[in-house]
């Protein structure tokens, strides 16, 4: 095993996202072309517990790839690839149908079926070329796959064995149930099929760890169970809020958000009823601190359960001791964790890794926001000590040089080089393109820290603890002052995205400062410049704000963090623009992202390429983008909240709503919105906004300005 | 607590509905699909969490929003 935790660094090559088929079961998943083929040298293959056990899988009939017709399958773990033998020259039609039934789970089983639809016997040579490189999952996603250690190939009776001589000895056996010839990395059969008959063979791909086979979930000879949607099993369906809108695309995007976040649901075996979600399918099926905190923050107006479950789970695993290997520190909120006995194996000895600069501040912000949305006293009291331990980290280990800014540098070579959300190895650069050296203090990390100080002050005020309120308000004010003095680049007219090891401002024009608007750390006199830059042609593509401006040295619209567009980043920027009163700008970002969602079939991917909308009529997908991805799925809900200008202060019995909705979505109505003990209906038309159902104070009526 | 009356008038059509029922989407499995028992216990199954029925012993897993049988209980015949 190499680096045990997940850099989310993207690949530098790979297939088109839309053409992939991904099957998944627990920590096993298989990514292939639409025809089922796994092509060598691509970010494809069969992965089990973070290692690639198949890196090539190519079926041929008489030396020719079958022609794909369709793929179907309702199960997450299985699909049928339907193809046909290409027609012979001079013949219009093919008579040989190829059905490949694939099931994954601790390995893979594949039933290959050839159907002769003609009245004549057919004979053909069937070959399957396979390979295994045992590459690390995140090396594959990062496009730097290469086995460490040696891989040897052996042959058994109708089987090929690959063994990987490494720190964790691994192996895989690909076995044919049905006699097969074996040579090198190829299995070969001769299929003689009578008229209107079929020929079948079953292949098992069986992984081994330390010589022990993993139990296949779908072994040869056992019929495969089918699944039912979990939601349909519940006789009683909980009625949640409902949105009615004149815009069919907006409604479809919101429905997809519910579907996708439900699909990413994870269960802590100790607390199965706490709602938590994985970060993204298929690469990040684990709990990530930053992802889950931002996702649940975005959902707060609609659903508070995810925020409560996330805060409780992260609190339960809050750092307690100093451990350089996992970067655990007292009070620190984790970066990534997995549940279950095999988690320790996947994460290199521990179940959690703590290398993140922002999750701790985001945790405090989330608890503060939860309280504003009416978190009950009991759960609030349970979370408060964890908030205070997080404050200790923010002002202590989080700021090792004591300059008042939180910065990061990994503790070992195995840690993440960059510990903000742009965590590619090259995700933080100067305008020249030069890569910044750690320790790095990121702009948005200071913004979140400011948000955490403000949240702690709010909580103190709400508890009647005036000393603590004054203290944390003072901390927030001091940080805001220092940030605006140090990070603002008057010659450029934008904020540095960070400070490097020598406290030099990292002067690239990037989306990071949008997050600074979001938490309010930006001085009012600088906000217009920030808004103008975010919507400039260099940053705004027409579909959204790019991660990095086109004028920057490291700009690449096809990169992971240096010019691509991320929906969650945009939702946060739009919220920031609206906070400072840049209504038209916030609307432009929201409308652009929602238009992109429509082009992606109403499901926003993790990210897409940063090409200009005028250059391509549709947003260009990013290869190996996660889809669904939790914070991308949640982004439309934050956009909706932003456009509604919905803001709570439940302990004070207040909710404010002052919509700035673009006309295309109107009329729009949200009903069944639960805030505290009340159930609200908000109805927005071009003429007026009506809020009903609020107990105290009485229903409000306001005109939208927009 | 009375729920708010619908205020979406006929003249506001055409409208498109999105039901944001996250409560259902985030719910843990509560009933055994075989015997209907509500005594489901979460279990550490290595790389994921399974749910086993205390009454009929059937075991279930949750995958991408779907429920699948891991092992059959005694209340139902083995799958064909
Ligand atoms: Zn510092
Ligand atoms: Zn049962």
Image (cartoon, rainbow, N blue to C red):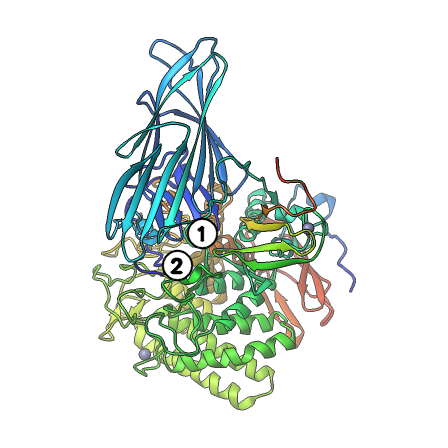
Residue at image mark 2: A346
User: Which quadrant holds the N terminus of chain A?
Assistant: bottom left
Secondary structure under tag 2 reads helix
From this viewpoint, is residue A611 visible? no
- The circle on residue A27 is 1
Specify the quadrant of the image occupied by residue A157. top left
- The image shows residue A552 at horizontal and vertical percentages of 25, 57
User: Which quadrant holds the C terminus of chain A?
Assistant: bottom right
Camera-side residue of A454 and B70: B70
Disc 1: CA contacts within 10 A as few (<14), some (14-19) or many (>=20): many
From this viewpoint, is residue A402 visible? yes
Camera-side residue of A578 and A280: A280
CA separation, marks 2 and 1? 10 Å
- The image shows residue A684 at horizontal and vertical percentages of 64, 55
- Judge whether A16 appears above or below A561 on screen: above
Give the residue drawn at x 47%, y 55%: B47
Residue A219 is left or right of residue A514, and the answer is right
Q: Residue furthest right?
A: B2
- The image shows residue B37 at horizontal and vertical percentages of 72, 53
Camera-side residue of A65 and A486: A65
């Amino acid at each position: 095993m190499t680096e045990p935790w997940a850099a989310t660094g993207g690949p530098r090559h790979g297939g088109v996202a839309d053409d992939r088929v991904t099957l998944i079961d627990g920590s096993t998943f298989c990514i292939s072309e639409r025809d089922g083929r796994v092509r060598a040298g691509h970010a494809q293959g069969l992965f089990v517990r973070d290692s690639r056990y198949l890196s090539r899988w190519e079926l041929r009939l008489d030396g020719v790839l079958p022609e794909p017709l369709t793929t179907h399958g309702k199960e997450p773990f299985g699909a049928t690839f339907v193809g046909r033998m290409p027609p012979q020259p001079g013949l219009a039609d093919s008579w040989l149908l190829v059905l490949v039934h694939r099931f994954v789970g601790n390995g893979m089983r594949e039933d290959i079926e050839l159907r002769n639809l003609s009245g004549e016997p057919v004979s053909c040579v069937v070959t399957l070329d396979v390979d295994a490189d045992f590459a690390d999952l995140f090396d594959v996603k990062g496009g730097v796959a290469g086995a460490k250690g040696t891989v040897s190939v052996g042959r058994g009776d109708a089987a090929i064995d690959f063994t990987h001589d490494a720190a964790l000895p691994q192996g895989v056996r690909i076995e044919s149930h049905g006699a097969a010839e074996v040579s090198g990395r190829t299995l070969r059969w001769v299929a003689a099929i009578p008229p209107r008959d079929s020929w079948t063979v079953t292949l098992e791909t069986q992984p081994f760890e330390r010589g022990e086979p993993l139990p296949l979930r779908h072994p040869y000879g056992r019929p495969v169970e089918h699944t039912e949607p979990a939601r349909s099993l519940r006789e009683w369906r909980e009625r949640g809020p409902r949105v009615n809108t004149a815009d069919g695309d907006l409604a479809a995007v919101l429905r997809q958000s519910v579907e996708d976040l439900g699909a990413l649901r994870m269960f802590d075996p100790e607390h199965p009823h706490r709602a938590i979600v994985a970060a993204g399918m298929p690469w990040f099926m684990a709990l990530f601190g930053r992802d889950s905190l931002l996702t649940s923050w975005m959902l707060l107006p609609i659903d508070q359960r995810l925020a409560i479950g996330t805060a409780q789970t992260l609190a339960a695993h809050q750092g307690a001791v100093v451990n350089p290997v996992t970067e655990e520190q007292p009070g620190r909120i984790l970066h990534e964790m997995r549940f279950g006995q095999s988690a320790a194996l996947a994460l290199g000895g521990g179940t959690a890794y703590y290398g993140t600069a922002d999750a701790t501040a985001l945790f405090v912000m989330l608890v503060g926001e939860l309280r504003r949305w009416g978190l009950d006293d009991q759960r609030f009291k349970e979370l408060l000590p964890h908030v205070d331990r997080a404050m200790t980290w923010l002002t202590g280990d989080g700021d090792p040089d004591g300059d008042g800014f939180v910065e990061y540098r990994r503790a070992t070579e195995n840690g993440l080089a960059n510990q903000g959300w742009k965590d590619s190895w090259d995700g933080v650069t100067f305008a020249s393109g030069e890569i910044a050296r750690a320790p790095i203090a990121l702009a948005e990390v200071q913004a979140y820290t400011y948000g955490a100080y403000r949240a702690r002050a709010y909580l103190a005020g709400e508890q009647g603890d005036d000393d603590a309120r004054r203290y944390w308000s003072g901390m927030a004010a001091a940080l805001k002052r220092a940030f605006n003095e140090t990070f603002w680049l008057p010659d450029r007219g934008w904020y540095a995205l960070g400070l490097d090891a020598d406290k030099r401002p990292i002067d690239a024009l990037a989306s990071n400062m949008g997050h600074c608007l979001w938490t309010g750390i930006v001085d009012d006199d600088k906000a217009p410049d920030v808004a103008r830059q975010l919507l400039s042609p260099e940053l705004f593509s027409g579909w959204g704000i790019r991660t990095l401006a086109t004028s920057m040295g490291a700009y690449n619209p096809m990169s992971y963090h240096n010019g691509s567009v991320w929906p969650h980043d945009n939702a946060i920027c739009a919220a920031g623009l609206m906070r400072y009163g840049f209504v038209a700008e916030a609307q432009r970002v929201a409308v652009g992202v929602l238009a992109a969602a429509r082009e992606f079939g109403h499901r926003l991917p993790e990210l897409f390429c940063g090409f200009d909308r005028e250059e391509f009529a549709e947003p260009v997908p990013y290869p190996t983008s996660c889809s669904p991805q939790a914070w991308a799925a949640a982004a439309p809900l934050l956009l909706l909240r932003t456009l509604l200008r919905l803001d709570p202060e439940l302990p004070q019995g207040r909710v404010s709503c002052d919509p700035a909705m673009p006309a295309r979505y109107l009329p729009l109505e949200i009903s069944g919105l639960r805030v505290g003990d009340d159930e609200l209906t908000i109805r927005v038309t071009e003429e007026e906004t009506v809020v009903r159902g609020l107990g105290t104070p009485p229903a409000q009526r306001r005109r939208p300005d927009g | 607590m009375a729920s708010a009356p619908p205020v979406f008038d006929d003249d506001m059509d055409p409208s498109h509905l999105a039901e944001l029922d996250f409560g259902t989407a985030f719910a843990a499995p509560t009933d055994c699909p075989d015997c209907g028992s509500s005594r489901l216990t979460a279990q550490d199954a290595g790389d994921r969490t399974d749910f086993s029925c205390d009454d009929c012993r059937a075991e279930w897993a949750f995958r991408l929003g779907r429920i699948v049988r891991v092992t059959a209980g005694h209340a139902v015949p083995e799958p064909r």
